[in-house]
């Protein structure tokens, strides 16, 4: 598995990074864990985001690093996620992670699914 640092890829905001680090610490996950992001069929717009912590690499993983955080995705998902930013909101409008995806042609009202 090769780590790629580039101008194009998957990114994480400072706020999301802080929240991810807090969650990993609270869950007792070591430094060998990373964020795995993927796109799956479903949701009202056709495609949904999936995010989880993982420590097992797969042969076809696409690996990016931003702000010291490793972000991993599969070959199919990287086509939908290229140049996407993982963001975290803790405001009154809702708490949680969301994706700012320049590839999405539309998103649903909840922001959890999209179409290209």
Image (cartoon, helix red, strand yellow):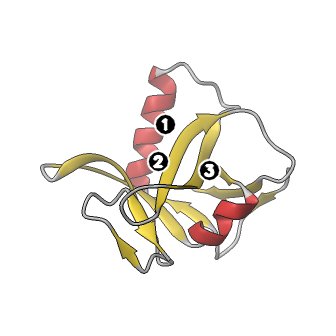
Q: Which residue position holds label 3?
A: 68
Whether label 2 touches label 1, CB < 8 Å: yes
Q: Residue 78 is drawn in which quadrant?
A: bottom right
Q: Residue at x 64, y 69 (%)?
A: 9
Taking 42 as reference, is 107 left or right? Answer: left
Q: Earlier in the sequence, mark 2 or mark 3?
A: 2
Q: Is residue 70 above or below residue 9?
A: above
Mark 1 crowdedness (10 Å alpha carbons): few <14, some 14-19, many ≥20: some
Mark 3 crowdedness (10 Å alpha carbons): few <14, some 14-19, many ≥20: few
Q: Which residue position holds label 1?
A: 21
The answer for how far apart the CA atoms under marks 2 and 3 are is 9 Å
Horizontal and vertical percent position of residue 67: 57, 55
Q: Which residue position holds label 2?
A: 17
The answer for how far apart the CA atoms under marks 3 and 1 are is 11 Å
Whether label 2 touches label 3, CB < 8 Å: yes
Residue 60 appearing in the image: yes
Please tell me whether mark 1 sits on a helix, a strand or a loop.
helix
Q: Residue at x 73, y 55 (%)?
A: 63
Residue placed furthest toward the top: 28
Horizontal and vertical percent position of residue 113: 40, 60
Please tell me whether mark 2 sits on a helix, a strand or a loop.
helix
Horizontal and vertical percent position of residue 104: 45, 75
In the rendered structure, find residue 99 and report the number of the disc placed on it: none
Please tell me whether mark 3 sits on a helix, a strand or a loop.
loop
Q: Is residue 31 above or below residue 4?
A: above
The answer for how far apart the CA atoms under marks 2 and 1 are is 6 Å
Mark 2 crowdedness (10 Å alpha carbons): few <14, some 14-19, many ≥20: some
């Amino acid at each position: 598995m090769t780590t790629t640092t580039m101008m194009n890829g998957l990114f994480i905001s400072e706020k999301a990074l802080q929240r991810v680090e807090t969650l990993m610490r609270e869950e007792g996950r070591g430094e060998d864990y990373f964020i795995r992001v993927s796109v799956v069929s479903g949701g009202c717009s056709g495609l949904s985001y999936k995010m989880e912590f993982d420590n097992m690499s797969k042969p076809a993983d696409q690996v990016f690093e931003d702000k010291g955080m490793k972000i991993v995705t599969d070959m199919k998902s990287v086509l939908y996620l290229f140049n996407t930013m993982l963001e975290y909101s803790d405001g009154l409008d809702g708490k949680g992670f969301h994706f700012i995806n320049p590839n999405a042609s539309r998103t649903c009202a909840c922001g959890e699914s999209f179409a290209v």
